[in-house]
Amino acid sequence: MASKRKNSLVANINRRKRAGKSRPKSRSTVSKESYRQMQKSWPKSGTKKAAKKQAAKKK
């Protein structure tokens, strides 16, 4: 059974980016403020990885 992908604004932005169909900033459809709000809800996985590396170095 094929997995169903979530059709979100972020997924569509990234799909277009990979395809090389990015718009110039002057023709952007997402405001800076909206994009900033989306970023707040993204997981902070990078900080956990960095913390694990620091803990491993101390041992």
Image (cartoon, helix red, strand yellow):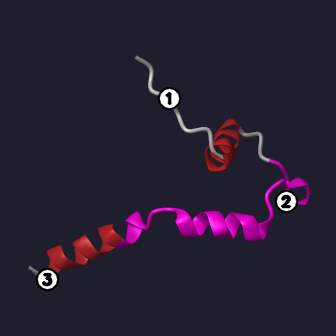
Q: Quadrant of the C terminus?
A: bottom left
Residue occupied by mark 1: 4
Q: Specify which label sits upstream in the sequence, 1 or 3.
A: 1
Q: Please, what secondary structure does the residue beneath circle 3 have?
A: helix
Q: Is residue 16 magenta?
A: no
Q: Quadrant of the N terminus?
A: top left
Kindly indicate the quadrant of the structure image that contains residue 43. Answer: bottom left
- Mark 1 and mark 3 in contact? Answer it, CB < 8 Å: no
The residue sitting at 57% across, 70% down in the picture is 40
User: Label 3 is placed on what type of residue?
Assistant: Lys
Disc 3 crowd, CA 10 A, few/some/many (<14, 14-19, 20+): few
The residue sitting at 70% across, 64% down in the picture is 35
Left or right, 36 with reference to 33? left
Please state the horizontal and vertical placement of residue 2, each as a whole percent of the image.
44, 20
Boundaries of the magenta span: 23-47
User: Label 1 is placed on what type of residue?
Assistant: Lys
Q: Is the residue 36 above or below the residue 20 in the image? A: below
The residue sitting at 15% across, 74% down in the picture is 56
* Mark number displayed over residue 25: 2
Kindly indicate the quadrant of the structure image that contains residue 44. Answer: bottom left
- Mark 3 and mark 2 in contact? Answer it, CB < 8 Å: no
Please state the horizontal and vertical placement of residue 37, each as a whole percent of the image.
65, 68
